[in-house]
Image (tube, rainbow, N blue to C red):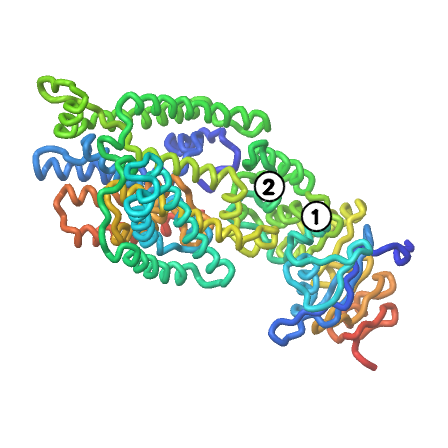
Amino acid sequence: MTSAAPGATSAAPDEPAFRRLLRATEVDTRMIGMIVALLLIWFGFNVYTQIQSGEGLFLTPRNLWNLSVQTSSIAIMGTGMVLIIVMRHIDLSVGSIIGFVSTIIGVAQVRILPAYLGLDNPSIWILAILIALVVGAAIGALHGSLVAYLGIPAFIVTLGAQLFWRGAAWWVTTGQTIAPLDGRFSLLGGGPHGSIGATWSWVLALLACVGIVASLYAGRQRRARFRFPQRPMWAEYLIAVVGCLIVLGATMIVNAYPWPERVAASWAEANHITVPEGGLFISTGWAIPVLIALAIGFAMTFLARRTRFGRYVYAIGGNPEAAELAGINTKRITVLVFALMGTLAAIAACIDSARLDSATNVLGQLDELYTIAAAVIGGTSLAGGVGTIYGALIGALVIQSLQSGMILLGFDSAFQQMVVGVVLVGAVGLDTFYRRRTAKG
Amino acid sequence: MDAEVRTPLVEMKDISIAFGGVKAVDHAYIDLYPGEVVGLLGHNGAGKTCLIKILSGAYKRDSGQIFISGQEVTINNPRDAKNYGIETVYQALALADNVDAASNLYLGRELLTRWGTLDDSSMEAEARKVMGRLNPNFRRFKEPVIALSGGQRQSVAIARAIHFNAKILIMDEPTAALGPAETAQVGELVKQLKAEGIGIFLISHDIHDVFDLADRVTVMKNGQIVGSGRVTDMTKDEVLGMIILGKCPPGAIPGPGAMQG
């Protein structure tokens, strides 16, 4: 790719077709690599289960739907971890923040808020979430301040914080698990009721398709206004078609997953509907936590690419001294990035505890490592300055796919950990090798 | 001609700064008039970069006063300096390697759209304009600046300094990373900016870089001022003597760092 002159989207005639495709569509080669790896994992597990049990268990609507829900919390935190690592820091405390915030959520909505607002007050779940977000942001801001103003390395601050908040989580409930949580709050965790059903899923999918086309059009207009080189038209159409197909295909899959029979039956009974012959088919559709994760993915991409804050994060990661000399308040940005990470961990805590319908101090153990792994597998460089939000989302999906597949195959958890460890080191090794080669050109 | 009766653009008086007991700058002083180029010379470690970093806000002085156009000012950080129209091209270039030329050009002063988001298209368009003036061969707007050559990086750094209506430009070893053609280009640029009435500090340890471009030179040694004078009143050899020995020639006004006797 080094031979490609910038802005020159017109291809040399003797260029191989695939490279020309990449250049014309301006798609990141690393992203293609990650998607290929993801598909290999998916089809590999599917074939394996087919051999083992006679039917492919991985690529089923049920498994893919579950995979999407399981991925959401790591994906949400991964987007924040990218910015942390881009700024040459690390956050080892996110798993413990989940545990601590989770117990706070539990105590707030089961013990404290009902005492003032009455049991089952509809504002309880909203207040609980707000409390969680404020606590998460405050914890993050505290870590960031220690890093920025006292100059303690982030590794040490967050390592200490990992121990501290895990212990604090125990103190909040003296180790008790709080369950069940508020019924409305539990919808955040997904499940049949925490999903939006077939109709709304299609509505969202169509809106997303309109959004893809509109943003491509707007991009073209903007380039035309400044007379920048354009992508060839065929490339624009290709991107639009592929993007829409992915959105519609994924929606078809989540809609093909029905409510479990028992849930559907009890719903039918409650609504006085007779269950027809052969069972009731109610589409689950997109799960709420997945939609939250996607929305956060978009918001964080926007933050990273289109705002001053994002630009400063990358500039500081690229050359902290230069950023400081350019007049950027690097300390403030550091505090903000950690506060953002804390907030995202709090959102993940809401989703995780809603999914379990309980709040417990051990929630989120080892999540910091999976989050870092998601960011790093997604192409974030630990040397700083380099990393993308979508990379972290795909990275989270890769990690979760591996785990989910190994569970389907009945691997024991010790072996799962070993595999994830090997994959992490392998992915970074490959990446380093790739970077060194492209640097040599 | 009669610059001395006008108010200097910059006047730094009695500036000192120490790092852990080492007096990097010891009661130094320097001034600069509009449309003038002042060369600041000295060996590596003579304190010239340090003195100038106090002006650009990278370091905070221990003592001394800074006047901009006759007004005493406080410069605590690079933002303060920029507010007074002081722009710096640093020796180490001070570019964020991982972002492109336009982003570096506007780093810390981004153009925003109506909605408060980054206006990358406008920034790139402006970058194309300003780079077109400085370095017409520059085409690589989309790449991180790490991919650029030394000269290209230097032109990005200079573009950043002059794009924001600088009144005072500080250039720290501006040609250290450059080939002869690019060095000549920087020389042309200095003359052009001087003609626009910008005051320029040119810092170098190499006398040849400075002598042809500067109106006056000030020489530092061991953190102290050896002396200063007009280049027309001195020869290159005399200036070399100031740099190496601290010997002040008759054409220059001696400072506290001048060799006694």
Q: For residue B242, which quarter of the picture?
A: bottom right
For the residues labelled 1 and 2, say whether their Cβ atoms are less than 8 Å apart. no
In the rendered image, the vertical position of residue B252 relative to residue A26, given as above or below: below
How many other residues sit within 10 Å of disc 1, few (<14), some (14-19) or many (≥20)? some
Give residue B205's position: percent from left, percent from top.
69, 64
Badge 2: how crowded within 10 Å, few (<14), some, or many (20+)? many
- Residue occupying image coordinates x 82% and y 60%: B216
Cα distance in 3D space between marks 1 and 2: 27 Å
Whether residue A430 is visible: no
At 62% across and 36% down in the image, what residue appears?
Answer: B128
Residue at which label 2 appears: B110
In this orientation, which residue lies closer to the viewer: A66 or A146?
Answer: A146
Q: Is residue B251 visible?
A: yes
Q: Quadrant of the C terminus of chain B?
A: bottom right
- The residue singled out by tag 1 in the image is B185
Figure check: A34 above or below A316: above
